Image: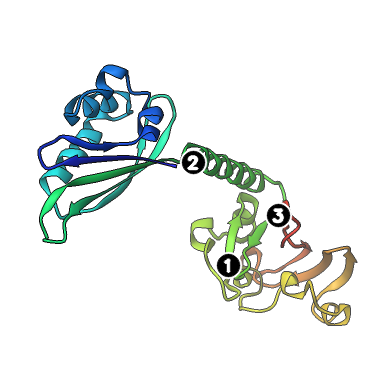
Amino acid sequence: MDGILVVDSHGQRIITNQRLLTMWRVPQEIRNQKNDEALLQYVAGNTKNPGQFLAKVMYLYDHQDETSRDEIEFKDGMVLDRYSSPVIGGDGKYYGRIWTFRDITDHKRAEDALRESEQRLADIIDFLPDATFALDKEAKVIAWNRAMEEMTGVDRNDMIGQGDHEYTIPFYGERRQQLLDLLDKDDKEIVSNYQYVHRKGNTLYAETFTPALQGGKGAYVWATAGPIFNSRGIE
């Protein structure tokens, strides 16, 4: 899977495997050269940031004891994971440096697609007309939309990441259980905390009075709570 390059202390290529040559589409005239300079310049010219690429290589050649791992982006969209370490003999002598390169383009594209999907979901939640917030499995706030900011007067930056029922204080003036905590509870226990409770599948609907809203005047709120499942049906 990995492209492998080993360069000795004099800048001569000792090992250049076929995977590396194919991955970089190295021209035949450069493949035949033992000195690493031509290959180095050729590859650098295909990266998005040649100066940064070359500077890292030169730095590692000048610092023989160091190892390094980073990612390199190419102009054609390819992304490689680059790892380098010194080649040290049993006698402790420095013989050169080994470089390994792994193509992680598909992985990075999948990460980008997931990130874009998560951002789209966040944008949808943010612009919902109803005040909406979401908790992760550790009961920490992961979404607090604009309508929720307007209803409670609490900025999302002050609420995202909060747990321990911090999100109930803007409604009740104290930490307490709320509808999400009662999803798996008996309906009798829910009725003791909320009015007009209705359950439909995994979703709870209820009405309650929230004394801390509207500057302490209080307000009646119709609330809906339900779990979030991924594509595999896992909560």
In terms of sequence position, does the residue under pointer 2 or pointer 1 come before the other? 2
Which of disc 1 and disc 3 is earlier in sequence? Answer: 1
- Residue nearest the observer in this picture, 61 or 194: 61
Q: For the residue labelled by badge 3, is the local secondary structure a helix, a strand or a loop?
A: loop
C-alpha separation, residue under disc 2 versus residue under disc 3: 21 Å
| Dot 2 amino acid type | Lys
Residue 230 - label: 3
Q: Secondary structure at mark 1?
A: loop
Instruction: Say few, some or many: other residues with alpha carbon within 10 Å of mark 3 (under 14 / 14 to 19 / 20 or more).
Output: few
Q: For marks 2 and 1, give the CA distance.
A: 28 Å
* Numbered badge on residue 190: none
Per the image, the residue denoted by label 2 is 108
Q: Which residue is mark 1?
A: 140
> What is the basis of the colouring in this image?
rainbow
State if disc 3 and disc 2 touch (CB < 8 Å): no
Of the residues shown, which amino acid type is indicated by label 3? Asn
Residue at position x 47%, y 37% in the image: 105
